[in-house]
Image (tube, rainbow, N blue to C red):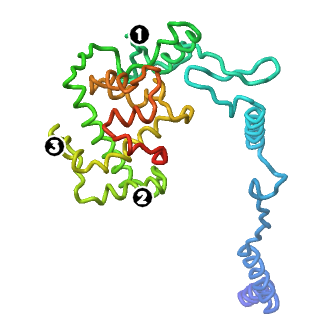
Amino acid sequence: MRVWIVFLLCLAGHAMAAPTEETIEEDIIAEEDIIAEEDIIVEEPVVEEPEVGANPVQVEVGEFDEAIDIFEEEQVLADNPCLDYHCKKGKVCEVDDDNTPMCVCQDPSTCASAEGEFEHVCGTNNATYDTSCHFFATKCALEGTKKGHKLHLDYIGPCKYIDACLDSELSEFPLRMRDWLKNVLVTLYERDEENNLLTEKQKLRVKKIFENEKRLQAGEHSLDLLAHDFEKNYNMYIFPVHWQFGQLDQHPVDGYLTHSELSPLRAPLIPMEHCTTRFFEECDADSDKYIALEEWASCFGIKDQDVDKDLII
């Protein structure tokens, strides 16, 4: 009997502890809600920062400073009267107290040093200058003096001994020179597709030379062959001689060549052709220090009736 009582009490206690169906369902729903809440990720709204520059008002400090620097630099250039004021070689532009530009002789010490021997130049005083800048600055300082008047750029490279030009050698110089001028023009014509190396009128002149089947091709030729070609194809050489005169007559264009205007042609030639100096000296037939077109043409063997100023295009 006692055993049954104990057994019944155990069953009653178990029944009280066991959940009802409703309780079970509520617990299940609660657990599902908790799980659902854990699975849901709440995303906070992302506020994108606008790119710098998207708003005209928004400019980084560094960019603003840079813009100011550029503006100030442009203002300095705009206010600089020397900006578009050109001076000849050996002079630089400076402004006076009234901010008026003027050309003054350059201090040779401000010239850049030569990077190699090829930058040295030799003056007619037989002195070697570090660069052409040093030469022209020195010449400018001597302006107005007898020494400065006689000083010119003689040739490119350091001064060296140059053999005297013999009469027989002098007669050979124009043969090579004429052929060289013709070939220079033909080369410019071949390369002048979009480079504007020649004017349209010049192209028409050179085209006739280029397409001529009798043209002597560029290369090393004997003096006899050069002389023969000049005699047989004389007309091919008329324009190249006139063209070279026009290329040199630039400062100013007055129909005469000065020593300075000849410099771009003669300075590189002298180290290779030792008759260059004598040739151009004797071209000045009247010894007035200027070479007129007629004198120039005569030096290259062009006949008087073929000298035509209209060919200097």
Of badges 1 and 2, the one in the foreground is 2
Q: Position of residue 103 (x, y in %)?
A: 66, 21
Give, as a three-letter code, the residue at label 3: Leu
Task: Give above or below for 140 relative to 221.
Answer: above
Furthest residue to the front? 305
User: In which quarter of the view is residue 159 placed?
Assistant: top left
Residue hosting label 1: 125
Task: Give above or below for 239 relative to 35.
Answer: above
Marks 3 and 1, how far apart in space? 38 Å
Q: Secondary structure at mark 2?
A: helix
Give, as a three-letter code, the residue at label 1: Asn
Marks 3 and 2, how far apart in space? 27 Å
Do the residues under discs 3 and 1 have CB atoms within 8 angstroms?
no
Q: Residue at x 56, y 7 (%)?
A: 145
Q: Residue at x 56, y 14 (%)?
A: 140
Residue hosting label 2: 204
Give, as a three-letter code, the residue at label 2: Leu
Which quadrant: the N terminus?
Answer: bottom right
Q: Secondary structure at mark 1?
A: loop
Q: Residue at x 77, y 46 (%)?
A: 60
Q: Which mark is residue 254?
A: none
**N-terminal of the two: label 1 or label 2?**
1
Instruction: Tell me: 292 left or right of 229.
Output: right
Q: Secondary structure at mark 3?
A: helix
Marks 1 and 2, how far apart in space? 44 Å
Residue hosting label 3: 225
* Residue closest to the eye, 21 or 155: 155
Of badges 3 and 1, the one in the foreground is 3
Instruction: Tell me: 112 left or right of 20.
Output: left
Q: Position of residue 167 (x, y in %)?
A: 22, 22
For the residue carrying disc 3, how many other residues have a C-alpha within 10 Å: few (<14), some (14-19), or many (20+)?
Answer: few
